[in-house]
Amino acid sequence: MSRPPPAGFGPIAGHWSPRVELAGTYDEKWERERQPLLAEDFDERFHQSAPADQQVPGFLRGGEEVTLHHLTPSGILRFRLPRVTLGIVTAFDDGEQRRHRACIHTVAFEPDVPRVILVWHTHLPCHHKVLKLQTTTIHLKKRIHVSERDRASGLWVGEPRNV
């Protein structure tokens, strides 16, 4: 008798297989030479808590079509992810300001509500300045070159800006 692989919609905990195998090697050598940094063999895929069949390569941008089958009374729910661009500025106590971008990191669906939750991720290399970090400001960037039709669709989030 053939058995299908386990399936689910919830996150896979970091101490469960298959994620734990991606965490890297934390042995005596790591304690002596790298602690508190991640192991040298740490695999970035560890950060993916979704089951493998629910992951996409790279990051989402917004605008992707989503189709949910048999998760609502109507049977099919189809929509596009909203397009949102965030402006992020981090200021340090020496007056330096760094701009950086965020990518959609997590998408959670609540089809019975209906609601979609988007989580953005950004990173900023500042290991030696981490204690000098003062503020990080996030703002919704205005959209340029978006047609009235696309703006009316609700796909594009952010006030239009005249160029």
Image (cartoon, rainbow, N blue to C red):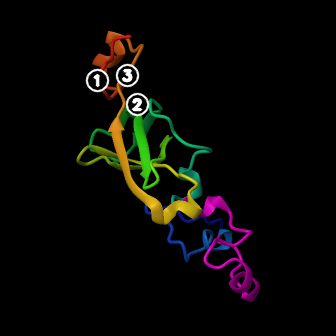
Q: Residue 159: name its quadrant.
A: top left
**Residue type, mark 2 in image:** Arg
The mark that comes first in sequence, 2 or 3, is 2
Name the foreground residue: 138 vs 115: 138
**Which residue is the site of mark 1?**
159
| Residue 14: in magenta span | no
Residue most extreme to the left: 113
- Please give the name of the residue rendered at 30% of the width and 25% of the height, measured from the top-left corner: 154
- Please give the name of the residue rendered at 36% of the width and 30% of the height, measured from the top-left corner: 141
Name the foreground residue: 19 vs 104: 104
Helix, strand or loop at mark 1: loop
* Residues at marks 1 and 3 touching, judged by CB atoms closer than 8 Å: yes
Helix, strand or loop at mark 3: loop
* Residues at marks 2 and 3 touching, judged by CB atoms closer than 8 Å: yes
| Number of disc labels | 3
Residue 140: x %, y % from top left: 33, 35
Q: Is residue 75 above or below residue 79?
A: below
Q: CA distance from mark 1 to mark 3?
A: 6 Å
In the image, 16: left or right of 132? right
**Which residue is the site of mark 2?**
83
State whether residue 68 appears in this view: yes
State whether residue 106 appears in this view: no
**Residue type, mark 3 in image:** Arg
- Please give the name of the residue rendered at 42% of the width and 13% of the height, measured from the top-left corner: 145
Magenta region, main secondary structure: loop
Residue 150: x %, y % from top left: 36, 16
**Which residue is the site of mark 3?**
143
**Residue type, mark 1 in image:** Glu
Q: Residue 153: name its quadrant.
A: top left
